[in-house]
Amino acid sequence: MSQIATPTTETCPECGATITFARAPRRHEIVRCPDCGAELEVTGVSPITLALAPEVEEDWGE
Ligand SMILES: [Zn+2]
């Protein structure tokens, strides 16, 4: 029993709200801030770092 299930939290870079992960996120996982709704990409897992996810929508020509 060496692993302890500790709550994993990180701060939303957009609004500063605390985001709680039910389990350790994986890198490049997209999470949504429950407070402001911003999509955040997990850019690192040790420690956890979050960055605003780039817009997925692309212009398909004009
Ligand atoms: Zn937020």
Image (cartoon, helix red, strand yellow):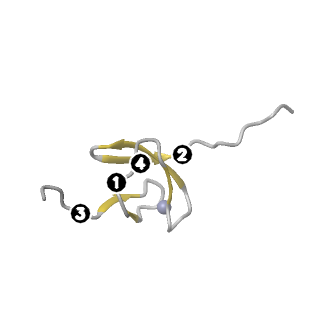
Residue 41 location (% of width, % of height): 48, 46
All told, the count of numbered labels is 4
Q: Which mark is residue 50?
A: 4
Residue 40 location (% of width, % of height): 49, 51
Q: Earlier in the sequence, mark 4 or mark 1?
A: 1
Q: CA distance from mark 2 to mark 1?
A: 18 Å
Q: Which mark is residue 6?
A: 3
Q: CA distance from mark 4 to mark 1?
A: 13 Å
Q: For the residue carrying disc 3, how many other residues have a C-alpha within 10 Å: few (<14), some (14-19), or many (20+)?
A: few
Q: For the residue carrying disc 1, how many other residues have a C-alpha within 10 Å: few (<14), some (14-19), or many (20+)?
A: some
Q: Which mark is residue 46?
A: none
Residue 44 location (% of width, % of height): 36, 41
* Farthest left residue in view: 2
Find numbered disc 4 in the image and state the secondary structure of the residue it sits on.
Answer: strand
Q: Which residue is mark 2?
A: 53
Q: Give the residue displayed 18% in from the left and 61% down from the top.
A: 4
Q: Are marks 4 and 1 in contact (CB under 8 Å)?
A: no
Which amino acid type corresponds to the residue marked 1 in the rendered image?
A: Ala
